[in-house]
Amino acid sequence: MLKVSKHKPKTITGLVLLTLLLTSSRLLPAQEIQVIKFDQLHQIITDKNAPIRVINFWATWCAPCVKELPQFEDLLDKYKNSPTEVILVSMDFVQNLDSKVKKFAEKKNLKSKLYLLDETDYNSFIDRIDPSWSGAIPATLIVDARNEKRTFLEKEFKEGELEKAYLDFIQ
Amino acid sequence: MKKSIFIRSAATAFLCFVLFNYTLANTPKAEGYKVGDQAISFQLKNVDGKMVSPADYQSAKGFIVVFTCNTCPYSKLYESRIEALNQKYASKGYPVLAINSNDMTKQPGDSFEEMVKTSNAGEYSFPYLYDESQEIATAYGATKTPHVYVLEKNKKNLQVKYIGAIDNNARDEKSATDKYVENAVDALLANKPVSTTSTKAIGCTIKWKEA
């Protein structure tokens, strides 16, 4: 009796998981992660036809980044009817795209737009994203290319701080 | 009258104190050093339990100060390169002094005990110092790991000659085409100006203590 009650749920969970895995890969394609170079990122930042963009620089290995990610997902959800786009730019190495970044994005079911910046010569582009950036992550750029307004924050957002920064920006 | 002046000055002093603490707590990276600035010296606990200071190195021409830690993947990627820098330059007068400034309550893997383990496992030939109060990282303006300051000794002063990354490829040492720290130290040893005096790189943020 004990044996049955111990194993049955596991089998059921396993079956459900298997079914989910098989169907989800077909019906719900995993969030796509586009691998880009700096020039493409620069275009995204400076695209004058784009809405307000909240661009977060993060990596799966960066604990404070991972901790604050839900704030970006919440912002996306809360302001989905405003002309605002939330973009997560992973600084993970490109060889970890499948093994780490995709896995993480699927596990967390990330809805923000995802990129992986495939550049190794950091000094060549950090200043071009923002001269005030030392290179530490997490860091976030809020930009409205239509009126060349931007704010750059090299910090970890405590609960509620991202939304405040966003609201300050749009005011 | 006297009393009100006293109250007023006490209130002002209190306000200043509060503001001062507020500023300290909220701007841990403050301004920090720029190339050309005089850097403060320090005396910090090494992994062997002894205190180490640049002043202990009588014959040194300067120092390669590396803010690093046990846990950051970028520090790990550069660990052997930091060791190689010390192997190459300590005998020439530019020893490596590695400093961990991370708050261990935020990052338990960066405690002093873990530093000892990391240093032993990596067989470090250089001191690995614990900046528990974070005063040195704050004074220098270090923001991430690894973050290098090449200092030149002029009499008793330490002048900042280079700030930034070790080289231009964290992922793959062999693909690094610009070895910033080596170039800076080579130039200093040859009495030539450092050509690239500051660079930037992605790194783990230093884990600051909560106010």
Image: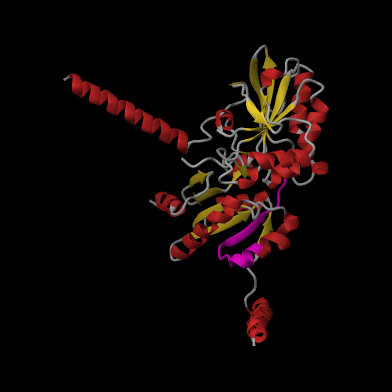
The quarter of the rendered structure image containing the N terminus of chain B is top left
At which x and y percent is residue B99?
66, 33
Q: Residue at x 57, y 38 (%)?
A: A131
Q: Give left or right: position of A16 versus A96.
A: left
At which x and y percent is residue B157?
63, 15
A77 or B1: nearer the eye?
B1
At which x and y percent is residue A28?
62, 76
Q: Which residues are magenta?
A: A104-121
> Would you identify the image quadrant in which residue B114 lies?
top right
Is residue A47 in sight in this rendering?
A: no
> Would you identify the image quadrant in which residue A97 lies?
bottom right
Q: Is residue B14 magenta?
A: no
B39 or B211: nearer the eye?
B211
Q: Residue at x 72, y 30 (%)?
A: B127
A145 or B208: nearer the eye?
B208
Relative to A124, say whether A20 is above or below.
below
Q: Is residue A111 magenta?
A: yes
Identify the residue at the far front of this view. Answer: A2
At which x and y percent is residue A138?
57, 48
